[in-house]
């Protein structure tokens, strides 16, 4: 039904859909209130914050619990932190933010902004407005540290807002972690805010990045390729690490790898256990093997059913 | 940002469908890849202070004239003539430019103590304006000051007591114009130069003339040799008017000509999409298009006509000059071409045009089939300089429903022309010889013209003559969406769709013709090289 509807919408033509631009004419650079230019200040005022709190606590979090039963580890360490903090997490899926927001302790949850790709989430006014309201998103340049978006984030950290940032710069196309960019480290060094490493596991099973979005042409039948980006029920885990602060004389270039290593270590912890993760620094557990794409996919741990997850606490028989 | 000039778009696969007028409705028409579309320049910015600009023009005349205030004195006879309802199109949102200029002239006249002032609507053979139309053009203040005292008149080309014969040109043309205007100490003419054809000597020599005078240039021969009306040096119509105008001047008529150009801001905010380039339509434009096109399609035709005729254009004053007729006109033409000129390279096999709901002769009225032909072939075809957009022997494809509907009060002789003349001949020369005289001198038509709101009996002939150049130039005229019987009565070919029309055109222009669409309105003038 929804697919039919989506197809119907995408098949609309001008004037029901926006007009196409003649090839023979150069496109002007329109002064638009989208992308990095989108002003999100309204979304941090109390009416919008209130609406967002209602949404996150009463709509989004219950949905997450249903579709992605979440195991949260290490959240107790955050109770001592008043904020603001920078949450640096690996990124696999569009549901990451909803899962993460549902896992962040309440005292930090409602004063958080999410750094979101300006070219994807802020490319139209409608999308930008929805993202700002629902997630408290702010537009950032994902490919590099952009002075303008960095200044916005620093200003917000100064005002006491925590920031969720995905240092990989986008969702992982294959479920494995990819190299981090310097944004989180830069913000931490400049603002002195601690970075909380977070590892999200299993979200790519709930809503994976579609092959088309990954730049991979969908093989097989159309129905196969569509089914890969369908929302599915799968258990997930959110593991918070210990907060990292920039060391004296440490710049963003040095701190960046520390953050990546901390997230990677949390990934190993999820795959093994706390102690093993600290003894063995093998990044292949989180970053996957350096091999052909199919082998990287092949090496991923199999999906697990919700019923197979850690058994519920029960009274001893 | 300064307004962008007009240009010629090459249609490719990414080009969205083009807005196409179809009388009292409009739609989107996909044009074949490789076609060209001529887009008008964007409207120029309005003058910031039009009142001051007008007063400055009156006091700093162009050419061999002295300032208006220096010519005004107590005891003189002052006549102010102004263009009628046919200009501008669509009618301008209040205040009309005529009101602004005439108020400035009257202020100066009042200051000089001029008592004998008469205002005359320069109708030529057009219908008399109604009171609301006069009030709109002049403003209530002017109307209420002059109309109750009989000092607001409408030119009557059939009133022998109010016409004066000034002489005959060296080409044997009678020059007979409005007596009050000719015998005044000063004749101020307030002109709106909507296109390059308007103004100059044509204002007085045509606007205030009698049938006896007009027939010398409103005939098939002159029209066929006007290539085009928009470029005076190539227009026999203008050459004749210039001859007559110079005779009028030599007869001692002191004309203080005021000419104005408006920008091409043609449609109000709610219809802005009609003058935007389709690929730049935003959500509001698309919603407006959907809502208005569907509403117009669904509405009864009378209601649709009323909705569209209710549109008042947000035209704004772009420039104003006053003084000697020819000097003023030369300056104004530069401004008109600057606003409306579009350079077009090369001619085309087929020209397409969507005809809107309005032309100069159906303001607050019905666009009857003869006016459809006149708008397409007389006006749109002639909006060029150099050579026509379409090559000789080419095809014109017009979009219009072309229903056999007439306004009996405004166009009574058109009905008889359609039923009696067009059933016998479509040839302008034959009909001018065989039928024109009878229609022009018919006492009933003259009575309706003089006392009602009817166009003169000869007017439909003139409309047909306006098409003479195009009819001679083109090998075929096709009307898409037109009532087949009516289209055939006009001597044209009916077609249901553009594809059908292209197929009909094939035997004339071949299987792979070049196509150019005139994206009009807003108005533009093609400078074809």
Image: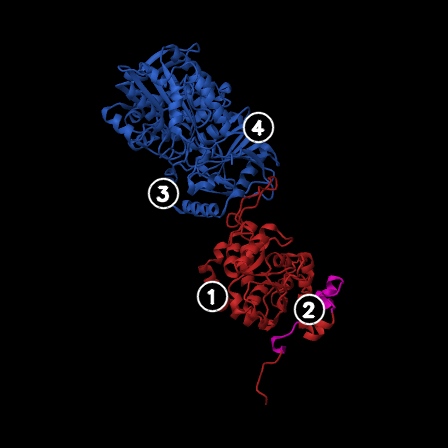
Chain colours: A red, B blue
Q: Is residue A308 within the magenta segment?
A: yes
- B389 vs A170: above or below: above
Over which residues does the magenta segment extend? Answer: A281-309
Mark closest to the chain's N terminus, 4 or 3: 3
State the residue position of label 2: A265
Residue B42: give x, y in percent of width and height: 50, 35
Q: Distance between the residues labelled 2 and 4?
A: 77 Å
Identify the residue position indicated by label 4 in the image: B391
Question: Quarter holding the C terminus of chain B?
Answer: top right
Of badges 2 and 4, the one in the foreground is: 2
Earlier sequence position, callout 2 versus callout 1: 1
At mark 1, the secondary structure is helix
Query: Circle 3 is placed at which residue position?
Result: B303
Q: Is there one chain holding both mark 2 and mark 4?
A: no
Q: Closer to us: mark 3 or mark 1?
A: 1
Q: Residue A66 carries which label?
A: none
Q: What element does badge 4 sit on?
A: strand
**Residue marked by disc 1:** A54
Which tag is nearer the camera, tag 2 or tag 1? 2
Write down the chain letter for disc 2.
A
Q: Look at the image and tell me whether residue B29 can be seen.
A: no
Circle 3 SS class? helix
Left or right of A13: which side holds A182? right
Q: Mark 3 lies on which chain?
A: B
């Amino acid at each position: 039904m929804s697919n039919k509807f989506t197809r119907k919408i995408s098949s609309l033509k001008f004037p029901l859909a926006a007009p196409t631009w003649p090839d023979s004419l150069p496109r002007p650079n329109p002064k638009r209130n989208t992308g990095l230019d989108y002003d999100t200040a309204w979304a941090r005022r109390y009416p919008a914050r209130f609406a967002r709190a209602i949404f996150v606590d009463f709509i989004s979090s219950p949905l997450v619990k249903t579709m992605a039963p979440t195991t949260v580890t290490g959240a107790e360490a955050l109770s001592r932190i008043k904020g603001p903090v920078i949450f640096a997490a690996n990124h696999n899926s569009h549901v990451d933010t909803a899962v993460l927001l549902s896992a962040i302790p309440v005292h930090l949850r409602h004063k958080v902004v999410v750094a979101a790709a300006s070219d994807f989430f802020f490319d139209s006014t409608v999308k930008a407005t929805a993202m700002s309201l629902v997630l408290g998103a702010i537009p950032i340049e994902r490919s590099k540290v952009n002075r303008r978006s960095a200044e916005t984030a620093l200003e917000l950290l100064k005002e006491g807002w925590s920031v969720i940032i995905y240092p990989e710069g986008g969702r992982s196309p294959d479920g494995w972690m990819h190299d981090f960019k310097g944004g989180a480290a830069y913000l931490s060094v400049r603002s002195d805010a601690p970075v909380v490493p977070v590892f999200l596991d299993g979200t790519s099973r709930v809503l994976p990045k579609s092959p088309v979005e990954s730049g991979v042409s969908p093989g097989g039948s159309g129905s196969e390729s569509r089914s890969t980006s369908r929302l599915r029920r799968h258990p997930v885990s959110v593991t918070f690490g210990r907060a990292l602060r920039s060391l004296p004389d440490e710049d963003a270039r040095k701190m960046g790898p520390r953050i990546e290593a901390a997230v990677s270590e949390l990934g190993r912890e999820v795959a093994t256990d706390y102690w093993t993760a600290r003894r063995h620094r093998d990044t292949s557990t989180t970053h996957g093997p350096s091999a052909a794409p199919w082998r990287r996919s092949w090496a991923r741990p199999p999906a697990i059913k919700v019923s197979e997850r850690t058994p519920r606490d029960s009274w001893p028989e | 940002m300064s307004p962008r000039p007009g240009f010629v778009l090459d249609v490719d696969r990414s080009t969205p469908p083009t807005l196409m007028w179809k009388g009292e409705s409009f739609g989107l028409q996909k044009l074949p890849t490789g076609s060209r579309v001529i887009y008008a320049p964007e409207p120029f910015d309005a003058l910031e202070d039009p009142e001051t600009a007008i007063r400055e023009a009156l006091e700093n005349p162009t050419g061999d004239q002295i300032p208006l205030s220096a010519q005004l004195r107590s005891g003189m006879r002052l006549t102010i003539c102004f263009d009628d309802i046919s200009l501008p199109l669509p009618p301008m949102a209040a205040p009309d430019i005529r009101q602004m200029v005439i108020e400035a002239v009257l202020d100066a006249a009042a200051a000089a103590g001029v008592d004998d002032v008469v205002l005359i609507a320069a109708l030529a053979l057009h219908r008399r304006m109604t009171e609301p139309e006069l009030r709109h053009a002049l403003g209530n203040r002017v109307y209420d000051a002059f109309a109750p005292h009989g000092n607001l008149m409408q030119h009557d080309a059939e009133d022998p007591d109010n016409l004066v014969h000034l002489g005959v040109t060296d080409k044997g043309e009678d020059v007979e114009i409005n007596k009050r205007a000719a015998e005044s100490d000063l004749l101020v003419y307030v002109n709106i130069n909507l296109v390059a054809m308007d103004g100059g000597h044509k204002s007085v020599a045509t606007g205030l003339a009698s049938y006896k005078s007009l027939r010398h240039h409103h005939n098939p021969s002159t029209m066929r040799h006007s290539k085009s009306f928009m470029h005076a040096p190539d227009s026999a119509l203008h050459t004749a008017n210039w001859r007559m105008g110079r005779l009028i001047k030599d007869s001692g008529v002191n004309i203080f000509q005021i000419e104005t150009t408006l920008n091409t801001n043609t449609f109000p905010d709610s219809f802005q999409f009609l003058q935007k380039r389709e690929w730049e339509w935003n959500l509001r434009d698309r919603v407006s298009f959907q809502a208005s096109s569907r509403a117009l399609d669904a509405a009864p035709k009378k209601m649709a006509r009323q909705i569209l005729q209710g549109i008042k254009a947000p035209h704004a004053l772009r420039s104003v000059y006053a003084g000697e007729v020819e000097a003023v006109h030369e300056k104004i033409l530069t401004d008109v071409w600057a606003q409306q000129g579009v350079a077009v390279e090369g001619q085309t096999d087929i020209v397409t045009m969507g005809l809107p709901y309005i032309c100069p002769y159906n303001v607050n009225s019905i666009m009857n089939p003869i006016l459809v032909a006149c708008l397409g072939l007389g006006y749109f075809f002639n909006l060029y300089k150099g050579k026509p957009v379409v090559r000789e022997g080419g095809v014109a494809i017009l979009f219009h429903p072309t229903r056999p509907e007439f306004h009996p009060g405004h166009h009574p002789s058109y009905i008889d022309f359609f039923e009696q003349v067009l059933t016998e001949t479509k040839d302008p020369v034959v009909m001018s010889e065989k039928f024109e005289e009878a229609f022009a001198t018919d006492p009933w038509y003259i009575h309706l013209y003089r006392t009602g709101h009817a166009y003169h009996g000869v007017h439909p002939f003139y409309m047909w003559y306006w098409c003479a150049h195009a009819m001679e130039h083109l090998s075929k005229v096709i009307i898409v969406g037109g009532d087949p019987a009516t289209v055939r009565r006009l001597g044209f070919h009916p077609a249901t769709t553009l594809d059908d029309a292209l197929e009909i055109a094939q035997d004339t222009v071949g299987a792979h013709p070049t196509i150019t669409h005139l994206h009009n309105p807003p108005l533009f003038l093609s400078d074809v090289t």
